[in-house]
Image: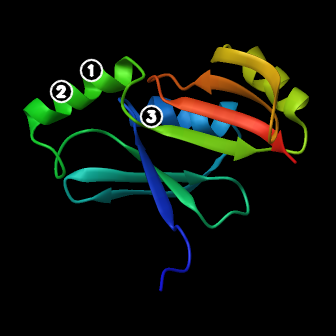
Amino acid sequence: MLKRNNISSIFVLDQDEALTFYTEVLGLEVAEDMNFGPMRWLTVRVPGDEKSILLERPGAPAHDEATADQIRALVTKGAGGGWLAFTTDDVEAAFDRVKASGADITQDVVAQPYGRDFALRDPFGNHIRIGEVY
């Protein structure tokens, strides 16, 4: 029987740029950053949370170069299939912090059936929602 989701992943085109965005703009912390054979294993997480997010660069060992090129093109268009949702106790403060960073805000704070949230894209086109959930 499954117990919990341990790790998720999203595609990023530059792991150093992703690390800066996810730690400095969103406030996540590095969980792991190591050379894992043919790839860099770079994970981040919400401080205090056990679940990590792999910031995965398309390529070996999972993809040949032609496939990696196709994935990079999709990610750049915001069609890479990756998206993340985070909760916060203060959606307005989170919005102000993210907006001040110059991040690509795609939706201001709005009321939703589940709470209030806003949307943005990371530097690579991945969709992110941050909100207060009731």
Q: Residue furthest front?
A: 113
In the depicted structure, whether residue 96 falls above or below residue 132? above
Q: Position of residue 14 (x, y in %)?
A: 38, 30
Q: Observer-nearest residue: 133 or 71?
A: 133
Report whether 79 appears left or right of 110.
left
The quarter of the picture where residue 88 lies is top right
Residue 7 position, x and y percent, is 48, 61
Residue ID for mark 3: 16
Query: Disc 2 vs disc 3: which is toward the camera?
Result: 2
In the displayed structure, 57 sits above or below 62; it is above
Numbered mark located on residue 69 in the image: 2
* Label 1 crowd bin: few (<14), some (14–19), many (20+), radius 10 Å: some
The answer to whether residue 39 of the structure is visible from this angle is yes
Tell me the kind of residue under disc 3: Asp
Residue at 45% in and 34% down: 16
Local crowd size for mark 3, using a 10 Å CA cut-off: few (<14), some (14–19), many (≥20): few
Identify the residue at image location x=51%, y=37%: 83
Percent of width and height locating residue 119: 67, 25
Q: Nearer the viewer, residue 77 or 46?
A: 77
Left or right of residue 110: residue 29 = left
Marks 1 and 3, the one that precedes in the sequence: 3
Residue 73, disc: 1
Where is residue 117 shown, x and y percent of the image?
Answer: 78, 31
* Count of numbered circles in the view: 3
Residue sitting at x 42%, y 22%: 78
CB-based contact (under 8 Å), mark 1 and mark 3: no
Q: Is residue 101 visible?
A: no
Q: Amino acid at mark 1?
A: Ala
For label 1, the SS is helix
Query: Disc 1 to disc 2, how far (Cα)?
Result: 6 Å
The answer to whether the residue labelled 2 contacts the one labelled 3, judged by CB atoms less than 8 Å apart, is: no
